[in-house]
Image (cartoon, rainbow, N blue to C red):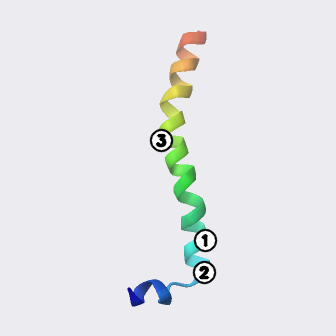
Protein backbone atom coordinates (compact mmCIF):
# COMPACT_ATOMS: atom_id res chain seq x y z
CA UNK A 1 0.00 0.00 0.00
CA UNK A 2 3.09 2.23 0.07
CA UNK A 3 2.73 2.78 -3.68
CA UNK A 4 -0.37 4.89 -3.12
CA UNK A 5 1.60 7.32 -0.93
CA UNK A 6 4.24 7.68 -3.65
CA UNK A 7 1.69 8.76 -6.25
CA UNK A 8 1.94 12.48 -6.99
CA UNK A 9 -1.29 14.55 -7.00
CA UNK A 10 -0.52 15.58 -10.60
CA UNK A 11 -1.00 11.95 -11.66
CA UNK A 12 -3.96 11.20 -9.40
CA UNK A 13 -6.19 14.16 -10.24
CA UNK A 14 -6.42 13.52 -14.02
CA UNK A 15 -7.33 9.90 -13.31
CA UNK A 16 -9.98 10.86 -10.74
CA UNK A 17 -11.49 13.28 -13.25
CA UNK A 18 -11.10 10.98 -16.26
CA UNK A 19 -12.70 7.88 -14.79
CA UNK A 20 -16.20 9.39 -14.31
CA UNK A 21 -16.01 10.92 -17.81
CA UNK A 22 -15.14 7.58 -19.39
CA UNK A 23 -17.80 5.80 -17.34
CA UNK A 24 -20.39 8.42 -18.26
CA UNK A 25 -19.49 8.20 -21.95
CA UNK A 26 -19.80 4.41 -21.82
CA UNK A 27 -23.21 4.58 -20.12
CA UNK A 28 -24.80 7.54 -21.93
CA UNK A 29 -23.11 6.96 -25.33
CA UNK A 30 -25.39 4.08 -26.42
CA UNK A 31 -28.43 5.91 -25.03
CA UNK A 32 -27.60 9.03 -27.05
CA UNK A 33 -27.12 6.94 -30.18
CA UNK A 34 -30.48 5.22 -29.65
CA UNK A 35 -32.23 8.57 -29.18
CA UNK A 36 -30.68 9.87 -32.41
CA UNK A 37 -31.93 6.84 -34.33
CA UNK A 38 -35.40 7.19 -32.82
CA UNK A 39 -35.53 10.89 -33.74
CA UNK A 40 -34.60 10.09 -37.34
Q: Position of residue 12 (x, y in %)?
A: 55, 74
Residue 8 position within the rendered picture, expressed as x and y whole percent measured from the top left: 56, 84
Task: Name the side, left or right, on which 31 lies relative to 10.
Answer: left
The quadrant in which the C terminus is found is top right
Disc 2 is placed on an element classified as: helix
Count of numbered marks:
3
The residue carrying pointer 3 sits among few (fewer than 14), some (14 to 19) or many (20 or more) residues within 10 Å by Cα, namely few
Percent x, y of residue 30: 48, 30
**Which label was assigned to residue 9?**
2
* Position above or below: 16 against 3: above
Alpha carbon of mark 2 to alpha carbon of mark 3: how far?
A: 26 Å
State the CA–CA distance, disc 1 to disc 3.
20 Å
Q: CB atoms at circles 1 and 2 under 8 Å apart?
A: yes
Say if 28 sits above or below 40 in the image.
Answer: below
- The earlier-in-sequence mark between 1 and 3 is 1
Q: Residues within 10 Å of mark 2 (few under 14, many from 20)?
A: few
Residue shown at 60%/11% (left/top)?
A: 39
Relative side of 9 to 1, left or right:
right
Which residue sits furthest left? 1
| 27 versus 32 height, above or below | below
- 3 left or right, relative to 37: left
Q: Secondary structure at mark 1?
A: helix
Among numbered discs 2 and 3, the one appearing first in the sequence: 2
**Mark 1: few/some/many CA within 10 Å (<14, 14-19, 20+):** few
Q: Residue at x 56, y 27 (%)?
A: 32
Q: Which mark is residue 26?
A: 3
Q: SS class of the residue under badge 3?
A: helix
Q: Residue furthest front?
A: 1
Quadrant of the snapshot with the N terminus: bottom left
User: Which residue is identified by label 1?
Assistant: 13
Amino acid sequence: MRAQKNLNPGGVLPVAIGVPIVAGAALFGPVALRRRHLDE
